[in-house]
Image: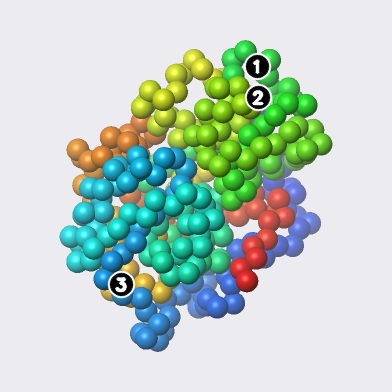
Amino acid sequence: MTGKTLAAGLLAMTVSMTLQASDLAPRFTDADGDMVADAPTDPAQWVDPNTLVFAYTPVEDPAVYAQVWDGFLKHMEAVTGKRVQFFPVQSNAAQLEAMRAGRLHVAGFNTGSNPLAVNCAGFVPFTMMAREDGSFGYEMEIITRPDSGIESIEDIRGRSLAFTAPTSNSGFKAPSALLEAEFGMVAEQDFQPSFSGGHDNSILGVINRDYDAAAIANSVLKRMISRDVVKPDSYTTVYTSQTFPTTGYGHVYNLKPELAEKVKEAFFTFEWEGSALQEEFKNSGEAQFIPITYKEHWEVVRTIDQAMGVTYNCN
């Protein structure tokens, strides 16, 4: 089984659907058609805080990632001239609400949360991590225990399957679309779903027999293996998807334009060699930040949202 058949199935499903999944909330404007909110034209509406607040997507232990990002945030302080504070969010919802409420200025939102953050919180993604050759992304995998008796997707019928969170691309939206489009399998009817709250929780839940199977991002799995949290022989993979964009990094739309440019400069001038970021992310291949656009790089994610009939309530 490959991701190509999933992509074809999703595209076929979108033909008869009408969706506003990529539409910005009414309070935003998009004069240039790039699908993200424009900066306010009135300087009085710009945000220029003394302290920039940064949050990394809450996929794993926030305490671990506060240390991982420390050197980068010190670099951002030097480039922007601002104090930068790490905000250890506990959930995707908390991260989205913090930016929407004006308490979060710079962030890395997970793949599936990017459309919601863009449309409802005014998030402007401009970069992601990539390998040295410029390639990027991760795959959704459905994993199980070697002794579970599950050898294919069909074997999950009547068993338990862990998702991470409703906003997660690889942890919920992509596998849900796959299971229904290609196998006619619907949660609650054909298998028992659970939400673990994070990819690490799902992975450990499978290994510890809390779930029969789980849909996860293999980039998280690789990092857990590199930290010796997970043994390579403690799980087996029954499905691997097409490649998806990874965490998108950006700033809130109304950050003062000059400051927003400094934030971008901090990402693109960061020296990876010898950094904690390099040490943490090298096992999933990342070695630099590259420029991206939401309109181009998140097209496949929006297609999955369309296939699932996802809409965003930004009220």
Q: Earlier in the sequence, mark 2 or mark 3?
A: 3
Q: What label does residue 49 carry, if any?
A: 3
The quarter in which the N terminus is drawn is: top right
From the viewer's perspective, is 173 left or right of 245?
Answer: right
Relative to 212, residue 78 above or below: below
Task: Report the front residue among 71 and 26.
Answer: 71
Residue 301: where, in percent of width, then height?
A: 58, 50
Q: Secondary structure at mark 2?
A: loop
Q: Is residue 97 visible?
A: yes
The quarter in which the C terminus is drawn is: bottom right
Q: Secondary structure at mark 3?
A: loop
**Label 2, label 1: how many angstroms apart (C-alpha)?**
7 Å
Classify residue 142 by image quadrant.
Answer: top right
Residue 186: where, in percent of width, then height?
A: 77, 39
**Going 21% across and 54% down the picture, which residue do you hit?**
74
CB-based contact (under 8 Å), mark 2 and mark 1: yes
Relative to 129, residue 47 above or below: below
- The residue under label 2 is 212
Q: What label does residue 195 carry, if any?
A: none
- The residue under label 1 is 148
